[in-house]
Amino acid sequence: MDGEEDAGGSPLDMFILSQDSLFGTKADQVIPSGSGWSARPSRREGGSGLMSAASVSSWVTGSTHRARQAEREELLLLLRRGVPPCLRCAVWVTNVVAAVSPDMPKHEVDEMGTLRKVQVLEHGWKVALRSIFPDATDEEDAHFPDFGLGDRNMVNLLLTGGPRGVSIPEKGAKALKRVLYAARMSLGIEYCPILPDMTAICLTAMDEAYAYATIRQMLEDSSHFFPLSRTEHVALCKTFGDLMLKLYPQTHAIMQSIGMLTPGALDPIFKRFFVTILRTEHVKRIMDLYTLEGLDTLFRFGTALMCLYHAHLTTRTELNCPDVHAWWDGVRHFAHSRRFKFDVFLSDQVYGVVSGTLRQRSIFPRRDVVERLMERNEELAESGRLDLTDDDLVAYVYNDNTLGFVEGEVPVVLAKHAAERHSLANWLPTSLSSTKLECIYSSNVHGRTIERFYHHVAKTKHSITLLEVLGKDVTIGMFATQTWHSNRDGYGDGNW
């Protein structure tokens, strides 16, 4: 274990350890040596020594602005390297407190993450539960509030558990429902589409009482963390588009051409907190920073990820992305591939710098620049100059089915790329969406006559026919549920 341990200190001064209330898995309880993290808060007020989970709170009375900034930057460096799983509960809670109350004395922020606060937070949670569920039947009858997330996204969250890709077990689902219901009934949150996924992420590192307390603290400065109205959400998405244009104009042009910069198209970032496109561990790494930096984190990671994915597009199929869903499918495949190096991405793109006239400057704009963009776009939304329509049907919900293929005598060409086979799976009946393809006819191998085509496919009941439009970089196709044969009356049974 790294850090200076105060052997004479009270056990109540130790940071609370993380626990997974969503899936019930055990967190690694080891704090790596040399990581810069400690099992208890640093005893040195404003000191330059070991950083703790709440050392950003060393902004005590009498500290200079420069010292406060130095402490914050030092903490951000630690957060970028990742928080030990066992400390995530303490770190996330104290980060939020420090973000909303930057002038709070260090020891008070520290205390929020220690065992000394457990009874207080648990008591507050029990009071909230008694007020919203006075009888056991009230909890049984309660529904999942979606806060504007939308039915399809909410169902997807419950069935896949977000980043873990498996269904949330009954016990975890009940915990999630209780916290979300309390946020709605006790805290008065009506619209906050990012809240369900964010709460689920919190519950992978803390119990219900701490998740509820974290959300309650975020409400103290809600504009720093999440939108609380459709107007604010639309302004948030518009600001993302403005930042893309400013930072990465070529990527912006591609995204604009396929409708990627509309609010519904940006759901994986601003409603789903990246859980449908990134690995579990990477989502939690983003949460490490989000709890301190708020919405800036979503802007940073979102814009950088779009640019990096665009830069890695190589094949004709990838470059000719037809729609929003194909784009996000591609982003997900890229982010789960060996080509995606998260730590390099974080240091070089998300928090990268460029050489300026006198000194290096961050690629990402200053916070005040982003805030001005947000204010301007909120005014546009409030005046009716931005479309406030919320269409759940455009929501991107990842379908994990991808057709396989069998390497037979005839090589697979048109459907060899995984993205193409994944797209095909979306058009097939559910019972066939995970099957394997085998090429039984190819015009390059068997000849380009209808007779040869009929000869090779005559015994196949279910078939996919793909045709490449020469000179157009376009492939079209169809799925047939009957055998192919010469028929003057036409084909088909309506299942397409």
Image (cartoon, rainbow, N blue to C red):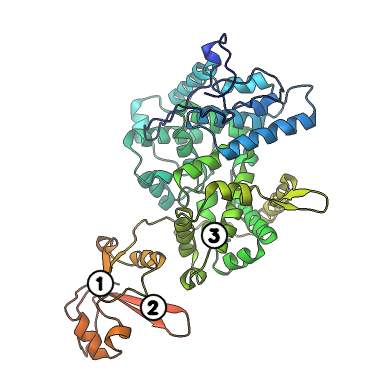
State how far apart marks 3 and 2 are (Cα): 25 Å
Image depth: mark 3 or mark 1 in front: 1
- Compared with 331, 477 (above or below) is below
- The structure residue drawn at horizontal position 18% and vertical position 81%, both measured from the top left corner, is 458
Question: Could you tell me the amino acid type at mark 3?
Answer: Tyr
- Compared with 141, 128 (above or below) is above
Q: Are marks 3 and 2 in contact (CB under 8 Å)?
A: no
Q: Residue furthest left?
A: 459
Question: Could you tell me the amino acid type at mark 1?
Answer: Gly
Q: Residue furthest right?
A: 358
The residue singled out by tag 2 in the image is 476
Which of the two residues, 128 or 166, is positioned nearer the viewer here? 166
State how far apart marks 3 and 1 are (Cα): 33 Å
- The structure residue drawn at horizontal position 37% and vertical position 75%, both measured from the top left corner, is 414
Q: Position of residue 451 (x, y in %)?
A: 23, 90
The residue singled out by tag 1 in the image is 408
The residue singled out by tag 3 in the image is 309
Q: Position of residue 395 (x, y in %)?
A: 47, 57
Mark 3 vs 1, N-terminal side: 3
Which of the two residues, 47 or 128, is positioned nearer the viewer here? 47
Identify the secondary structure beneath mark 3: helix
Question: Could you tell me the amino acid type at mark 2?
Answer: Ile
- The structure residue drawn at horizontal position 51% and vertical position 29%, both measured from the top left corner, is 32
Disc 1 residue crowd, few under 14, some 14–19, many 20+, Cα 10 Å: few
Disc 2 residue crowd, few under 14, some 14–19, many 20+, Cα 10 Å: few
Residue 128 falls left or right of residue 76? left
